[in-house]
Image (cartoon, rainbow, N blue to C red):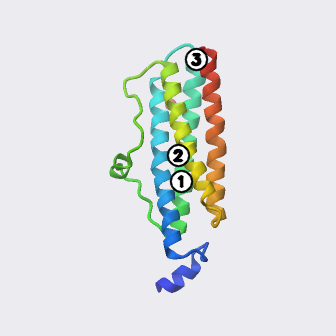
């Protein structure tokens, strides 16, 4: 199929090539961000210990599962727009994402670290949501992710406030 025909068949076909590539790059950036978040949440899920063990163990797992769903949404949107998902281990390590504590077991420290990770993911989603006025389906994905990220950050904060 010629690329001209293919372009007409793509959704958001009013986007020019440069803009489409910008959107795909943003989606790829947030794809590595959500994969990293899912890994961090699992790290916290496995290692947490302390008085709030059960609640946090389960909440961390919920966040990991949601982050995996978000990576699926982002990747499938960018492929729908004609891009290629960049989600290899090399892509992840080259993305310069924040580190997550490896040998930490304390519930409050893991909760705080995951909370910070959620907030930095939310900042990226908010910035990209604002930048997607011309591409509503992508904007909708960003808004959906942002809404749940902020809810989970609030839930983690509520656990931390217990310890103050
Ligand atoms: Fe588990």
Callouts 2 and 1 close, C-beta under 8 Å: yes
Disc on res. 72: 1
Residue count near mark 2 (Cα–Cα under 10 Å), binned few <14, some 14–19, many ≥20: some
Name the N-terminal-most of marks 2 and 3: 3
Q: Which residue is identified by label 3?
A: 52
Disc on res. 68: 2
Seen from the viewer's position, the closer of residues 118 and 9 is 118
**Would residue 64 be seen by someone viewing this image from the given angle?**
no
**Would residue 142 be seen by someone viewing this image from the given angle?**
yes
The image quadrant that residue 63 belongs to is: top right
Residue at left offset 61%, top offset 53% = 142
Residue at left offset 54%, top offset 76% = 16
Seen from the viewer's position, the closer of residues 49 and 148 is 148
Is residue 39 positioned above or below 17 on the image?
Answer: above
Is residue 8 positioned above or below 137 on the image?
Answer: below
For label 2, the SS is helix
Quadrant the C terminus occupies: top right
């Amino acid at each position: 199929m010629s690329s001209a025909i293919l372009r007409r068949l793509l959704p958001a076909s009013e986007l020019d090539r440069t803009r489409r590539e910008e959107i795909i790059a943003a989606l790829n950036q947030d794809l590595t961000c959500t994969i990293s978040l899912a890994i961090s949440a699992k790290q916290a899920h496995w290692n947490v210990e302390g008085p709030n063990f059960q609640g946090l163990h389960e909440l961390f797992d919920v966040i990991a599962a949601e982050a995996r769903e978000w990576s699926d949404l982002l990747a499938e949107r960018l492929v729908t727009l004609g891009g290629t998902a960049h989600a290899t281990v090399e892509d992840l390590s080259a993305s310069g994402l924040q580190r997550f504590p490896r040998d930490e077991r304390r519930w409050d420290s893991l909760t705080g670290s995951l909370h910070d990770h959620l907030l930095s993911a939310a900042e990226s989603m908010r910035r990209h949501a604002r930048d997607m006025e011309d591409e509503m389906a992508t904007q909708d994905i960003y808004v959906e992710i942002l809404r749940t990220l902020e809810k989970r950050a609030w839930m983690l904060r509520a656990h931390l406030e217990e310890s103050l």
